Each structure stands twice: as structure tokens, then as C-alpha cells.
């Protein structure tokens, strides 16, 4: 199963990002709006997988739909489940199972953490902080959140991909 995870985050227009996650079984692709600080939220929740709490949730606003990621630690793995709710203004406090499970996968934490970290770094490398702010308008690039995730991932995961890269 290792190595089949793909994750990307691309600024697709002013105030919109394309978030894509895929494994060999299928993919989930969403157009996420800047109504929330979506990339920062994701980075903080993924960083949370290195702490004591076993479940992390992050919601993305698709205007008007909500896509909610539930991340659950299970030993060295993370169960990723993505739920879809048609109207975020009504679903923000709804339990997960009132939504539609639209994608799920179990991945080693070191693979998932690395993929999210790399995708965020790619956004920063491509746009820079000023360019990011111009496109995402409401929120600056989450520098601190990315640093936190990188530090935790490199401290707790024995990541072969990171050990091979000079910028780590
Ligand atoms: Zn790594």
C-alpha cells in the first residue's frame, strides 16, 4: 500500500483551490473556497496526528457544500474518511454519518504526513508568500503550520523520502 497515495493542493483561481487526494482505488477532487483558511486548517489537523488525540477533523467549504475529512490514528496508520454534506450552513455541527462517505483510505502516517507537507511546500515554492496572499486573499500562507508539520513529521516518522532530500 505504501507509495500509492497522491495528494495535491493547487490555487486554481482567486479564492479557490483544487484539493485532490487519490490512491489506487479512486480519487477525491474538490474545489475549496477561501471562506475558511483551508490549507492552514489541514496542516494543523495533520500535525495533530502526531499528538495525543486520535481523531482530527477538518472541513472545507465548497460553497455551499461541505467536505469533511476525518483523520483517525490507528497505530502507525491513519484512516482517512471524506464525508460530503450538501449544505455547509446546516451541516457544520452534524455528525459524520449524516454525510455521504465519498472517499476513504488507510495510509501509513509517514506517507500521508509527507504527502501533505510536500504539497504545501510546493504551493509556497510556486507562488511565494506574496503570490499566495494575492490568490487566497483572505489568509496568508500558513508558514507556521507548515513548519510545525515538517518538524513533527521529521521527528516522529522515520521517513525515507525526507532522509534522501537535501532541503530537510
Ligand atoms: Zn518525509
Image (tube, rainbow, N blue to C red):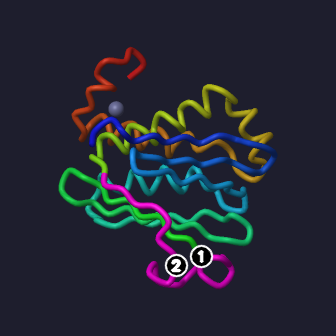
Left or right: residue 68 versus residue 25 is right
Residue 139, how many percent across, how many down?
A: 70, 50
| Residue under pointer 2 | 99
| Residue under pointer 1 | 85
Image vertical order of residue 122 relative to residue 21, above or below: above
Using the rendered view, name the quadrant where residue 8 is placed: top right
Q: Residues within 10 Å of mark 2 (few under 14, many from 20)?
A: some
Distance of mark 2 from mark 1, alpha carbons?
A: 5 Å
Q: Nearer the viewer, residue 25 or 105?
A: 25
Q: Residue at x 27, y 32 (%)?
A: 159
| Ligand 1 falls in quadrant | top left
Using the rendered view, name the quadrant where residue 163 is placed: top left
Q: Residue at x 65, y 85 (%)?
A: 90
Describe the element under mark 2 as helix, strand or loop. loop
Residue 15, how many percent across, how many down?
A: 77, 51
Q: Tell me whether the residue at label 2 lies in contact with that at label 1, contact meaning CB atoms closer than 8 angstroms.
A: yes
Q: Which mark is residue 18?
A: none
Using the rendered view, name the quadrant where residue 57 is placed: bottom left
Q: Residue at x 42, y 18 (%)?
A: 167
Image vertical order of residue 141 relative to residue 125, above or below: below
Amino acid at each position: 500500500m505504501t507509495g500509492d497515495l497522491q495528494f495535491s493542493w493547487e490555487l486554481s483561481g482567486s479564492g479557490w483551490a483544487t484539493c485532490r487526494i487519490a490512491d489506487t482505488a479512486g480519487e477525491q477532487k474538490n474545489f475549496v473556497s477561501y471562506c475558511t483558511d483551508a490549507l492552514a486548517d489541514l496542516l494543523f489537523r495533520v500535525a495533530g496526528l502526531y499528538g495525543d488525540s486520535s481523531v482530527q477533523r477538518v472541513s472545507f467549504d465548497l460553497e455551499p457544500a461541505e467536505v469533511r475529512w476525518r483523520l483517525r490514528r490507528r497505530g502507525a496508520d491513519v484512516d482517512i474518511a471524506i464525508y460530503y454534506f450538501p449544505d455547509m450552513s446546516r451541516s457544520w455541527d452534524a455528525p459524520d454519518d449524516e454525510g455521504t462517505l465519498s472517499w476513504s483510505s488507510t495510509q501509513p502516517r509517514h506517507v500521508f504526513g509527507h504527502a501533505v507537507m510536500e504539497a504545501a511546500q510546493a504551493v509556497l515554492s510556486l507562488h511565494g508568500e506574496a503570490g499566495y496572499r494575492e490568490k487566497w486573499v483572505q489568509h496568508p500562507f500558513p508558514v507556521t503550520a507548515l513548519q510545525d508539520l515538517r518538524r513533527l513529521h521529521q521527528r516522529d516518522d522515520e521517513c525515507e523520502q525526507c532522509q534522501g532530500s537535501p532541503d530537510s
